Image (cartoon, grey):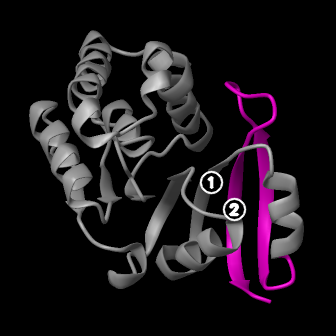
């Protein structure tokens, strides 16, 4: 991971504290993963920032849930001209995300409390999704919201190869699988050029 400022580390720590505080009421992450929050959640999301290296534009995080990876991306890029949009249909989780944005002073972040396919096309430069849906459904969302020159970063578990294979009948896309640093069987799928087959 690239070197980060003290302010960034403080924000990451505050974010972790907010997740721990709200989790019993809302179930933002599996309770069993809280003791390993750094390795299971933060490090997993931090590698995405290292891979994408966004310098500006719009970053759309689909199904943000408790803010992984969207809030982590926002913290790590707080000093860059990057607008971050978190889409989460669960109103309690949206309320949590807005609370985090306020407490951590992340002015470039907008929380949209709605369904992903119900909002207008966002024409995003970057899209992220973590543990959200099977690849065919994700590509439908990416196709709707990613600008033609944009890149989607889809965090997938051990079934990513099978999902990629049976998605090719319906979709055309370029795919680069970057091995996950936190799970040897998982990958971050860098997807570009999405169109219907």
Say which of 20 and 76 sits in front. Answer: 20
Residue bearing mark 1: 154
Q: Establish if 67 lies above or below 197.
A: above
Instruction: Report which quarter residue 157 is drawn in.
Output: top right
User: Residue 89, image x and y in percent?
Assistant: 31, 66
The residue carrying mark 2 is 191
* Dot 2 alpha-carbon crowd within 10 angstroms: few under 14, some 14 to 19, many 20 or more: some
Q: Per the image, is 191 magenta? A: yes
Residue 185 to residue 155: above or below: above
| Residue drawn where x is 51% and y is 36% of the image | 49
- Horizontal side of 149 relative to 116 (left or right) equals right
Left or right, 107 with reference to 27: left
Label 2 residue SS: strand
Residue that protrudes farthest toward the bottom in the picture: 197
Of labels 2 and 1, earlier in sequence is 1
Q: Secondary structure at mark 1?
A: strand
- The quadrant of the image that shows the C terminus is bottom right
Query: What's the mark number on residue 12?
Result: none
Q: Position of residue 39 (x, y in %)?
A: 55, 18
Which residues are drawn in magenta?
168-197
Q: Main secondary structure of the magenta part?
A: strand
Tell me: residue 5, above or below residue 178. above
Residue 167 percent location from the top left of the image: 81, 74
| Residue at 38% from the left image edge and 75% from the top image edge | 122
Looking at the rendered image, the quarter that the N terminus falls into is top right
Real-space Cα separation, disc 2 to disc 1, in angstroms: 8 Å
Q: Is residue 34 left or right of residue 12?
A: right
Tag 2 near tag 1, CB within 8 Å: yes
Number of residues whose C-alpha sits closer than 10 Å to that of mark 1, classed few (under 14), some (14–19) or many (20 or more) = many
């Amino acid at each position: 991971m690239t070197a980060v400022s003290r302010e960034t580390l403080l924000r990451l720590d505050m974010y972790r504290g907010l997740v721990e505080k709200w989790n019993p009421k809302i179930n933002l992450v599996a309770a069993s993963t809280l003791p390993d929050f750094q390795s299971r959640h933060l490090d997993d999301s931090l590698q995405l920032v290292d891979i994408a290296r966004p310098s500006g534009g719009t970053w759309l995080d689909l199904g943000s849930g408790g803010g992984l990876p969207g809030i982590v991306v926002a913290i790590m890029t707080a000093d860059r001209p990057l607008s971050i949009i978190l889409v989460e249909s669960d109103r309690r989780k949206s309320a949590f995300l807005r609370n985090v944005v306020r407490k951590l002073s992340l002015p470039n972040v907008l929380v949209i409390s709605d369904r992903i396919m119900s909002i207008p096309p966002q024409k995003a430069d970057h899209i992220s999704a973590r543990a959200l849906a099977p690849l065919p459904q994700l590509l439908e969302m990416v196709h709707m919201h990613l600008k033609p020159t944009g890149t989607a970063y889809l965090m997938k578990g051990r079934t990513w190869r099978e999902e990629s294979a049976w998605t090719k009948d319906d979709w055309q896309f370029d795919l680069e699988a970057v091995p996950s640093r936190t799970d040897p069987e998982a990958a971050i799928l860098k997807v570009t050029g999405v169109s219907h087959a």
